[in-house]
Amino acid sequence: MRQSKLFSKVLREEPKDEKSINAKLLVRAGFVDKLMAGVYSFLPLGNFVLKKIENIIREEMLKVDAFEVFLPTLHPKENWQKTGRWEKMDDLYKLKVEDKEFALGPTHEEVISPLVKKFLSSYKDMPLNLFQFQNKFRNEKRAKSGLLRGREFLMKDLYSFNSSEEELENYYEKIKQAYKNIFQRCGIWEKTYLTLASGGSFSKFSHEYQTLTQAGEDIIYICKKCNLAINKEIIDIEEGKCFQCKNSNLKEEKAVEVGNIFKLNEKYSKPFDLSFTDKNGKKKFVLMGCYGIGLSRLMGTIVEVHHDNKGIIWPKEVSPFKFHLIEIGKSGKVKEIANEIYQFDEENILYDDREDKSAGEKFAEADLIGISLRIIVSDKTAEKESVEIKERGEEFSKVIKKDEIKKIIK
Amino acid sequence: MRQSKLFSKVLREEPKDEKSINAKLLVRAGFVDKLMAGVYSFLPLGNFVLKKIENIIREEMLKVDAFEVFLPTLHPKENWQKTGRWEKMDDLYKLKVEDKEFALGPTHEEVISPLVKKFLSSYKDMPLNLFQFQNKFRNEKRAKSGLLRGREFLMKDLYSFNSSEEELENYYEKIKQAYKNIFQRCGIWEKTYLTLASGGSFSKFSHEYQTLTQAGEDIIYICKKCNLAINKEIIDIEEGKCFQCKNSNLKEEKAVEVGNIFKLNEKYSKPFDLSFTDKNGKKKFVLMGCYGIGLSRLMGTIVEVHHDNKGIIWPKEVSPFKFHLIEIGKSGKVKEIANEIYQFDEENILYDDREDKSAGEKFAEADLIGISLRIIVSDKTAEKESVEIKERGEEFSKVIKKDEIKKIIK
């Protein structure tokens, strides 16, 4: 894509109404725009990143035998009354239209449980795993952390339906591997801890994926001995000791929850009478699990973890483009080489072809945008049929022959 | 995909609460499920079709230099007050949360106009074209036509920003070609008429794409002489004559609007002060155009146009799978050949590997689901290393050698 055609422009100054690093950088570099507190528009650059994250997650979901669905945002009040969450859930958006009431879906157990009931009757119909990408809505009181806490946010939610505890447990472990792959590919696994959290009233614990960052609103304790992390909300129960090794040398850290996995067991299958006939002809309730990742929050977290004082440093797999091709100078030779490289893989290259920007401005904007690999074509190297390449995080570039670039690109 | 793993099951009977053909067939065959009037869940089969339609539209949008964005569903009341539509639009969903009010976006002029204002200042910033795929919301009083009229529905909306009437006109014509491509690839172009419709108060006419079907809620008049179509809502103005050739031999037809294109001109740029400096340094308002296609409505329309008394007949490019591989009989040879073919292109084949279904049941379900090309492996042909192939719409199959199938698949 030619940068001269890019709709968004890098802003000269940080947005004044943003406090979080992720929002400051993403707004300033033209990835997102704030419509109101907790509600953001994704501009073309931001949409590229979102699609890359979506594709990574979809690939990993298909590997664990999950099928994609697309469920509605408007939910009937009755479904939410059935589980008691119409009254209990503080941050549920409720819509009243004439005499009818609806919830705007913050999660989809109330829709998917009665849906699955229509098709599932026997243990042979399980395991069954359904996922979707869908905008969710929560009436957040404090929406001030940019993409980390939205009133409207994109989520992948996955639900598993199982006929036995063992089957559910097996899938739960499979998802742990899938989530590790996802966070690894998104470049945040090294700072992400599988964290014990409250299991609600239906199982002892759930697991959260907590990524260490000062921007996080959660407090976790990491056991220095066995590396287990525990959410502060449950630590008191066991008197400040590690749940696993009973060590009491725990380190307090701020973190943001980028994903969670939860054994729901019969919590939602009971109110919706989602049951099946087991091998012995006995009626039982389906055991459910749910597994979420907030895509927009994940995007914000990546920025919190990967940036420096010049801007964002996108990990390779989620970089909006693979290469940022920067043309310095207006000589025919520079244009010629830049064009040749651009035509080689237009889809994966952001080509800074702008003629009204100085080299300094171009580099500063490229640092802010943070594409992982940079290719510089300038008079200095063009004459020798060479270009410079540089990773966004690195200080120095290296000069290589133009023809070698083609190998790197493909 | 193995059909034994397919979550949805074909229902024995037509759903009793559906009146439209599209909903009857799509619900019964397991593509969608009705959550409430005008609100449907897309099951895996339905999601496959939706993604194919989405990809066709995205490809055609990229060809006309449009960039993808993703805008929010929650809109601030103030934006809708600015254009007067907070009061004027009957079917706007309004959400009241404590002292704040929001609209659930039925269209996005009120969001994209102030967004573009932040980045656009000169005639050099245009032409600019932005599109998105996004769920829209409308409080439809009569939501009884299945996917043709939803309270929540998936749309592609595209907005163009132009510096002159000529530039807008050029893009408008370009979009006509893109829309023709889209409806052609979706298999409904032959029944679709570019139709003159009301232009609101800001341009004389807009254009609708109206597809002939008894399920349609619009009435159009087609000129038998010049083939122009005119929406009933504007025909009275010109005394029942064709606007183009003044012929009065017009044929009345029922039709459904699958897309529309509209010159908004200054309608939304004025209230949001979306202006630019022209070549002579003069301030002018941006001229806008908007171009919509409802994806879920398009899916329903395809079914209205392409079905017979046995079920759906998907056009090739939007078929949920390219091939329906049906295994008849349990001999080792049948399994062997079916497996060999399946492994050749698992992603594009729905493989009916179910052992508890008779040949008759399998064929009846395949007819209902309507995948465009069928491959049948049975004892009869397996011994001769052959299979039968048949298009969904055709009556007879033809026998071909197993190895030829591979050529067809790739």
Image: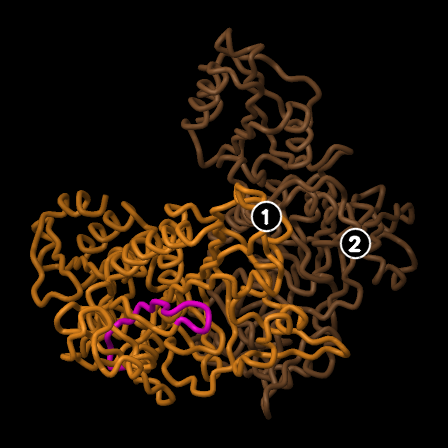
Chain colours: A orange, B brown
**A404 with respect to B257 (left or right):** left
A400, B7: nearer the viewer: B7
Q: On the same chain: label 1 and label 2?
A: no
Is A324 situated above or below B104? above
Q: Residue at x 70, y 47 (%)?
A: B301
Residue type (three-letter) at the residue carrying disc 1: Leu
Q: Chain of mark 1?
A: A
Whether residue A289 can be seen here: yes
User: Badge 2 is on which residue?
Assistant: B17
Q: Determine which residue is flagged by label 1.
A: A120
Q: Is residue B55 above or below residue B166?
A: above
Residue farthest to the bottom, as pictured:
B99
In the image, taking residue B333 as reference, residue A59 lies left or right, namely: left
Name the residue: 27% across, 66% down.
A194
Q: Report helix, strand or loop for mark 1.
A: loop
**Disc 2 residue type?**
Asp
The secondary structure type at the circle numbered 2 is: loop
Q: Is residue B31 left or right of residue A236?
A: right
Crowd around label 2: few <14 · some 14–19 · many ≥20 (10 Å)? few
Decide whether residue A56 is among the magenta residues: no
Q: CA distance from mark 1 to mark 2?
A: 21 Å
Residue A177, quarter of the rendered image: bottom left
The x, y position of residue A369, in whole percent, is: 27, 69
Judging from the image, mark 2 belongs to the subunit labelled B
- Figure disc tally: 2
Residue segment shown in magenta: A199-216
